[in-house]
Image: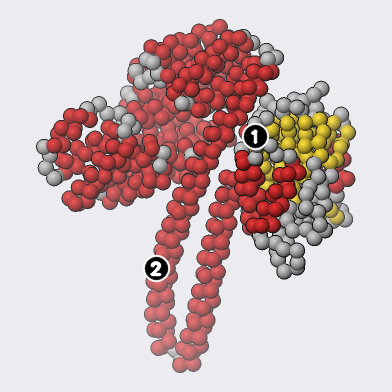
Amino acid sequence: MKRNKQIFFILFLAFYQICFAQNVSVDSLKLVLESCKEDTTKVNTLISICKNEYRSSPDSAIFYGNKALNLAEKLKFGKGLAYSYKYIGMGYYFLGNYSETINSWQQSLSNFEAINDKVGVSNILSNLGALYANQGDDVKAIDFHLRSLKAAEESKNTLRIATSMINIGVIYLNNPKTHGQSLKYNLSALPLSEKLGNNDAIGTVCVNIGEIYFQKEAYDTALFYYEKSLNAFRRSNSGNVPYTLTNIGKVYMKRGDFKKAIEVQQEGYQIAKQSDAKLEMTATLLGLAETFLAAGNYKSAIITYDKARGLAEEIGAKKELRQAYEGLSASYAKMSDFGNAFKYQTLLTNIKDTLYVAANNNKIQFLQLNYELDKKETLISLQDVKIKKQRFTQRTFIIGFIIAILVAIQTYRNYRRKVKTNKLLNKQKDEIEIQNKYLTDSINYAERIQSAMFPSQEILSEDLFDYFILFRPLNIVSGDFYWFKKNNNSIFIAAADCTGHGVPGAFMSILGLTFLNELVNNAAKLSASEALTRLKDHVIRTLQQKHNNSGTRDGMEMALFILDLEFNKLQFSGARRPLYLIRDKQLIELAGDKMPLGIYDDGEITFTNKEMEFKKDDIVYLFSDGYVDQLGGPERKTFKAKKFKDLLLNNCHLPMNEQKEVLEKTLDEWRSDIEQIDDILVIGIKLKFGSV
C-alpha cells in the first residue's frame, strides 16, 4: 500500500489555522454593532464578525464582509477594504467557490499594496499559494510563496517569514527531486520558530523535516524530528499530537518493531478519542491498521480498518474512506477471502470515481481561472510594450528630425523612406508575434482541457491489473486518445486514432470521449460491437456526413474490449484496429472490421463482436498506427506490424513498466534523427485475475 502523505499536510493546515484562531464571541460583537456609528469602528466590528464566522458560517461571513466592504468604500478606508476582501475570500474558500476566492484575494492584495502594508501583502500571497498548492498547481503555488517570503522579509515580520518558508518547504516536499530545497527552507524556518517560541510552528516544521528523512529511509533522523514535533505539539495543546504519534508508529513499523509501533499508535488513538476528534481518530486508526497489516495480523487489520471505515462514513471523509476500502481489500486478499476483497475493491473504485470527478471539476475551474489570469497578464504586458514603443518612436522621430535638418534634402528623403519601411515591417512582425502567442496559448489551453477529459488511470486498479500507457502526441494536442470506464461488473477499455492530428484530431477525440461516457452511462447492458456501431452513427450525425464526395470524410479508428468480471469473458470489436493478446508466450490477434467510425461507402453498417474467456496473466495490447508507421532504421522505412509483434513477444516476460521502457527505447533508436510523423499510443494491460 502507498504511504499516505496527508498527515503532514493536515499538520501544516492546522498550524495555519491556529495562527489565525479567534476567541472573540460573535454574539457580543453583534451586540456592539447595534450601537456603532457609521465610522471605521463599525467597519472593524463587521470585519471581526466575518473573521470569526468564515469557517463555521461562511455564508454569514460573506454577508457581514460585504457590509464592511460597502461602508469602507464609502469612508475611503483602505485598511478596511483590504481586510474585508480578505475575509470575504476566506468565506468563499470554505464554500468551495475558488473563483470568487481568488477574485476577493486579488482585490485584497491590491488594497494592501496601496496602503504599503507588507505584512498584509505577504499574508494574501501566502493564501493564494496555499490555494494553488491544494489544487496541485505547484508552479503557481511556489511563485506566490516566494513573493510572500520577499514581502515578509521587507516587513521584517519573523512569523510571516517562518510561515512562508514552511509553505515553500511543503511545496518542494511534493517531489523527491526537490527534497533538498524543502529541507533547506524547513531548516531555515526552525530557528525562527524556536526564537518566536511558537510551538505550533516548531511542531509543523519538525514533522515536515521528519517526513523528508522518512522518505529517504533515514529512520533514525526521521524519528528524532518526529519526537521533537511531538514534544512541541504536547506543549501547544493544538490537537496535533495523534498525527505525530501515528508518524512515529510508522517509523517503528518500518524498523520491524511492530509491538512498539502499535503501542504508540494506540496512544494516539486514545488521545484523539478523549477529544472526540473523529477525523483524527480515523487517521490514527488507518495508521494502526496499516501496522497490523504489515505485521501479518490480518484479522486485527480488518477490524481496525472497518472501525476507521465507520468513522469516515459518519463524518463524510471521502479520502480516509478510500484508504479504509483499500486496506480492507488488501487485508481480505491476504486471507484469500477474495469475495470480500472484490467487494471493497469495487467500493474503492466507486469512491475513486467520486473523488476524481470532484478533483476534475476543480481542475477545470482552475484551468479557466489560470487562463483568465494569464490573459490579463498578457494584456498588461502588451500595454507596457505599446507605451515603451510609443516613447521610443517619439524619441527616434525627434532625433531623426534634427538629423534631417542638418543633412541634404535627398538624404533626408531617403532616411524617411527607410524609417517608413522599417516601421511597417516592425508593425507586421509585432502583429505576427502577438497572433502566434495567442494561437500557442489557445492550443496549450486546449491541451489542458483535453488532458482533464482523459479518464482516471485509477480505474485500472493495481490489485486487478498491471499496465502501462505509452502516449506521445505529435503536437501539443493529440488525435489519439485512450478511454476506460467501469460499469457494474464490466470494465470498458479503448484506444482510438482520430482523423489527422493536432487541433483537428483533438476536437475529434473530445467528441469520442464525450459520447463513449454518455453511451456507457445510459445503457444497462452493452456489447463491444453495439458500442462501436452507436458511436459510428453518432459521428455521422454530428459531422453531417453523406454518401457522396461533397461531405467531410473525418472519423476515427478504434479498438474496444470489455472485461466481464463476473463470468471471466472478454468481448472485442474493432474499427480498423486489432487487439493483440499474449497467453503462454503465444500472440493471438483479434482483427477489427475494415470500416472506420464515420461514413463508409462499402455498405457495412454494424461491427463484429468477438468473445473469448480470459485467463490470469493474459496480456492485452491496444495501439494506434503511430508506432508501426514510424519511419526509421538505416533504410528510413516504417517499423511495420511484424517487427512490433516480435518486440512484444520477446519482452512479454518483463514487468509492464519495463516493457514500456523497452518500447520507448526501441522507438527512439529506430527513429534516431528522423522526426516523429504521427501521434503514438500503445496500451498494455496484464490481468491479475481470471480462470487459471
Front label number (2 vs 1): 1
Tell me how many marks there are: 2
Give the vertical position of 319 relative to 534 (above or below): above
Amino acid tagged 2: Ile
Image quadrant where residue 326 sits: top right
Check disc 1: other Cα within 10 Å, few if <14, some if 14-19, many if 20+.
some
In the rendering, which numbered label is found on residue 585? Answer: none
Quadrant in which the N terminus is drawn:
top right
Q: From the viewer's side, name the closer residue of 391 and 625.
A: 625
> Which sits earlier in the primary sequence, circle 2 or circle 1?
2
Q: Residue at x 41, y 13 (%)?
A: 273
Q: Residue at x 53, y 9 (%)?
A: 262
Q: Left or right: 167 with respect to 507? A: left
Give the vertical position of 168 relative to 550 (above or below): above
Q: Left or right: 626 with respect to 367? A: right
Q: Badge 2 is on which residue?
A: 387
Do the CB atoms of the residues marked 2 and 1 lie less than 8 Å apart?
no
Give the vertical position of 544 relative to 517 (above or below): below
Q: Left or right: 522 with respect to 116? A: right
Q: From the viewer's side, name the closer residue of 181 and 28.
A: 28
Note whether residue 474 is visible: no
Q: Badge 1 is on which residue?
A: 487
Quadrant in which the C terminus is drawn:
top right
Q: From the viewer's side, name the closer residue of 273 and 416.
A: 273
